[in-house]
Amino acid sequence: MARGGARSIRQALLALIVIGGIAGIAYVAWSQRPIPSYASEDVTSGSPFDVTFRVENKDLSFALANLRVSCVLDHVRASGMEPTMIASNDLRFPAGAAQGLEPGQSATFTCPFRSLIGHPINEDPGIAQRSEIYFRAEYDLPLPRFLGSFRITDNSVPFFLNTRLLPPRWTAKPPKKS
């Protein structure tokens, strides 16, 4: 009976080690996926919502194929407005690029928040300073030929209008300190 119990414990430990190994490999593979980075151009005139943004593939190995970027007006303090997602319809890729970004390439886009013109909050001139936006990228991660591709959706960190910089621009929100 002791041998049967020992064999069961050994098989259970072996199963846990195999499952842990598979989970570890999956975690390492997921953490190596390409993640687009975003930057804002300077707000020099007009609405801060009409600024051009840049999306860049900083990964050195993988392309961002079939890239689509959406802009999300996450929240506006003291407005009660629900988060609003608007697809970027003017994503401009570098010359020769199809619908994606090769390693090291970047593209530009604007967020069409002007479509919210009918909303009462647009009458408020300080709306951009109380807003947070983020970007949602959808792209295909190329896999080996026999596996095809894998569609990934990635949300960026929140951005806020940083008026401490001259000229002002949208910058990533610093992480909260504990």
Image: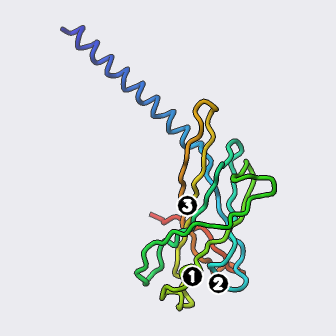
Residue located beneath label 1 in the image: 128
Q: Position of residue 40 (x, y in %)?
A: 68, 70
Q: Please name which of the two marks, 3 or 1, marks the residue nearer to the observer.
A: 3
Could you tell me which residue is drawn at 45 percent across and 80 percent down?
77
Label 2: state its secondary structure.
loop
**Mark before the other along the chain sequence, 3 or 2:** 2
Q: Work out whether 111 lies above or below 25.
A: below
**Mark before the other along the chain sequence, 3 or 1:** 1
**Which three-letter amino acid code belongs to the residue tagged 3?**
Arg
Q: Position of residue 9 (x, y in %)?
A: 28, 18
**Which three-letter amino acid code belongs to the residue tagged 2?**
Ser
Q: Position of residue 27 (x, y in %)?
A: 50, 39
Label 3: state its secondary structure.
strand
**Mark before the other along the chain sequence, 2 or 1:** 2
Q: Work out whether 140 lies above or below 166.
A: above
The Cα–Cα distance between marks 2 and 1, rounded to whole angstroms, is 8 Å
Which label was assigned to residue 71? none
Quarter of the rendering containing residue 51: bottom right
Residue located beneath label 3 in the image: 136
Answer with left or right where residue 166 lies relative to residue 4.
Answer: right
Could you tell me which residue is drawn at 48 percent across and 66 percent down?
176
Could you tell me which residue is drawn at 59 percent across and 44 percent down?
33
Answer with left or right where residue 35 lies relative to residue 6.
Answer: right
Which label was assigned to residue 47? 2
Quarter of the rendering containing residue 82: bottom left
Answer with left or right where residue 73 lies relative to residue 93.
Answer: left
Q: Are marks 2 and 1 in contact (CB under 8 Å)?
A: yes
